[in-house]
Amino acid sequence: MNKAVIFDMDGVICHTNPFHSIAFQQFFAKRNLQPTEEEFAEHMYGKSNSYIMSHFFERKIEGNELLELEDEKESLFREIYQHHVDPIGWFLEFFHQLHENGFKTGVATSAPMANLELIAGKLDLFPYFGSVLASENVTKHKPDPEVYLKSAENLKVNPKDCVVFEDSFSGITAGLNAGMKVVAVLSSHTKEELPESHFYIKDYSEISPATVNEILCN
């Protein structure tokens, strides 16, 4: 079988957004900024750090300044989250069933590699990934399809034979732009807040490898 399932990480493997919020609140509080939860929902979840910081600082954040600020915020996140790594319901069962059924798997996140190493490392996912891509591995961020097209290339699978699991507007758009089927994980947003996807789940008890096959065949 030459079919693949590619997972985003935040909000898809683990429900990390509440912990990113805490890290960003601490990060912004040091700078006398107090974004609301509504602002985070609109301008943080599923967005790159470049976008988030540029939005809240109201100026373009790039280059070395971005790298330094990103490192500070993501280090805060890892410090907070390292004691809470916990996959979304039935994720591990579904993930291992995919392998038993011959699917290739990859991960494609906008987060830094250090975050991916923390989460995938704790959950022992690396031995099963045929492609591992984080923010350092792409030049264009979601909704650009680069990270998903690169994943398909690494997995040696045609994009039309890939299913992407995503939870954000920009991530789902990236998967669709790559010509892939998309399963929306409703961890951070409602169905109505997201682009139209091929399938929707609240957790992984609502999907099976057989369903993934059906999604690819339709």
Image (cartoon, helix red, strand yellow):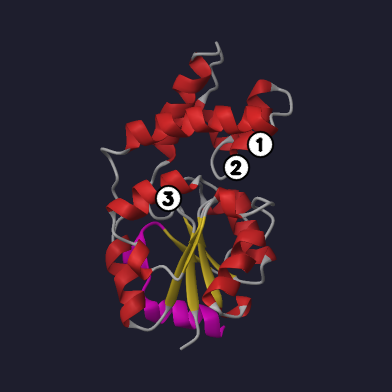
For the residues bearing labels 2 and 1, Cβ distance under 8 angstroms? yes
The magenta-colored residue range is 202-218
What residue type is disc 1 on?
A: Tyr
Position of residue 105 relative to residue 47, above or below, is below
Q: Which residue is mark 2?
A: 47
The percent coordinates of residue 112 (x first, y second) are 50, 45
What residue type is disc 3 on?
A: Leu
Q: Residue at x 54, y 85 (%)?
A: 217
The tag earlier along the polypeptide, 3 or 1, is 1
The percent coordinates of residue 141 (x first, y second) are 65, 50
In the rendered image, which quarter is residue 218 located in?
A: bottom right
For the residues bearing labels 2 and 3, Cβ distance under 8 angstroms? no
Q: Residue furthest top?
A: 32
What residue type is disc 2 on?
A: Lys
Q: Tell me: 28 left or right of 85.
A: right
Q: Which residue is mark 3?
A: 116
Q: CA distance from mark 2 to mark 1?
A: 6 Å
| Residue 194 appears in the picture as rendered | no
Q: Would you say residue 69 sits in the magenta stretch?
A: no
Question: In terms of secondary structure, where does tag 1 sit?
Answer: helix
Q: Residue furthest right?
A: 60
| 150 vs 187, nearest the viewer | 150
Question: In terms of secondary structure, where does tag 3 sit?
Answer: helix
Q: Which numbered circle lies on residue 51? A: 1
The percent coordinates of residue 127 (x first, y second) are 34, 67
Q: Tell me: 93 left or right of 202.
A: left
Q: Nearer the viewer, mark 3 or mark 1?
A: 3
